[in-house]
Amino acid sequence: MQTSFTLAQLADPEVAESEKILRACVHCGFCTATCPTYVLLGDELDSPRGRIYLIKDMLENDRPATAEVVPHIDRCLSCLACMTTCPSGVHYMHLIDHARAHVEETYRRPFVERVLRAIIAKVLPDRKLFRLSLFAAFLAKPLAPLLDLVGLAPVAAMLRLAPAKIPPPGRLGPCVIPAEGERRGRVALLTGCVASVITPQINEAAIRILTRHGIEVALAEGEGCCGSLVHHLGRKEEALQAARHNVDAWMGEIQGEGLDAILVTASGCGTTIKDYGYMLRNDPHYAERARMVAALGRDVSEYINKINKLKVAPTPALVVAYHGACSLQHGQKITREPKEVLSKSGFVVKDVPDGHLCCGSAGTYNMLQPQLAMALRDRKVACIAKVAPDVIAAGNVGCITQIAGGTEIPVVHPVELIDWATGGPVPGALRRLVDTV
Ligand code: SF4
Ligand code: SF4
């Protein structure tokens, strides 16, 4: 694609990077077929190619975002299916991140939207505030239909997404969980924010698998939200601050006892952590260290799949529908490892038809775009039903919550199944099912 940025514009490193991305696009349109919003809405402006044109127009002409453009940018899930499809290697993720920051800087959203986004940005990354807000949401759940009627669908969606039961707090750092027997490796594990509050059992399962197989696990002092929640809201500086914070925390471990990897059980966070090197590339104090941290980032399935000889104990050979989270399959290009390690653990793994399409969770998307998110969820649940599974496995807390809201089939993280198969407890969501097998 031809571009006509001035030299003055290209002096801004963000613009220079976006210009490179724009030039790679040959407008072939292959990406439209795999874009969930184009599939649902059929509007070119809600396709990757259409959005690329809108972003080019804003950046090239130094145009502030407008009420006509913003909805198309907002409707993008950042699922990155377009990056998997694109034959020209267009780095859409970095382009849409830049566009979201541009929207945030140049567009004044309606009052309710501003308040809602500010609340999300403040509450979700903060474990204590998020936990408190879940109690409030639980009490306010019956008001959801009323909020829908008065035009506050995003607030209603938030209430509906709040879990019916809030688990006791999970283990947080700083601490080191020693390996059982001879130590064969040492990793850090991200505790993060939302996942540590609503699904603490996932990291506990990961810790049991790792230590059982000789891997010491460190929960680093000061580590917290990876920054992806605010990043996707266009709040660039807040995202960079979160990234710096985690870089400092993990550098302490790297320079101390050392780390073989930094493991993440929420793939949305993993995609962001693997991008820290890019995010902080223009920060002279952090660029090098951010690259080191990013290079150590691994999805937990990547690491566990490399463990020699999983200690598998007999469990029922359940049929598992594997849902590939977008951040895992498109963001990190990890498709094989979670399924391989589930198979090695004795489960019968089935792919979900149209598995490349997002379930609608996408970070805060299911709160901010509830109707589209619900349509995608229903489509995903119908596709999953076609393989008639006993259980659904997904490597991202957002997908687990989203899909579980639309089906009676239990939804768990792959590590919960692998932990069970290697000597851990039956996953909580499966207890009733296992009793009947
Ligand atoms: S597939 Fe790639 S090159 Fe083709 S229009 Fe989409 S982003 Fe551009
Ligand atoms: S990230 Fe997903 S929703 Fe956004 S343009 Fe690409 S395919 Fe479409």
Image (tube, rainbow, N blue to C red):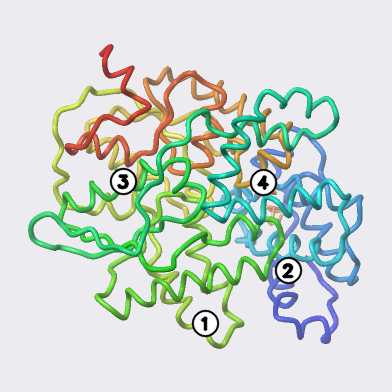
Mark 3 or mark 1: whose residue is earlier in sequence: 3
Q: Amino acid at mark 1?
A: Tyr
For residue 77, the mark is: 4
Q: Which residue is mark 2?
A: 23
Residue bearing the label numbered 1: 286
Q: Which mark is residue 204?
A: 3
Q: Nearer the viewer, mark 2 or mark 3?
A: 3
Crowd around label 2: few <14 · some 14–19 · many ≥20 (10 Å): few
Tell me which residue sits at (39%, 54%) in the image.
Answer: 299
Q: Secondary structure at mark 2?
A: helix
Q: Is residue 104 left or right of residue 427?
A: right
Of marks 4 and 2, the one in the foreground: 4
Say if disc 4 is inside 8 Å of ligand 2: yes
Q: Position of residue 361 (x, y in %)?
A: 60, 39
Pick the quarter of the image with the N terminus: bottom right
The residues bearing labels 4 and 3 have C-alpha atoms spaced at a distance of 29 Å
Which residue occupies 57% across, 39% down? 134
Which one is nearer the viewer's eye here, 99 or 432? 432
Image x and y of residue 254, in percent:
32, 76
Given residues 75 and 53, the one toward you in this image is 75
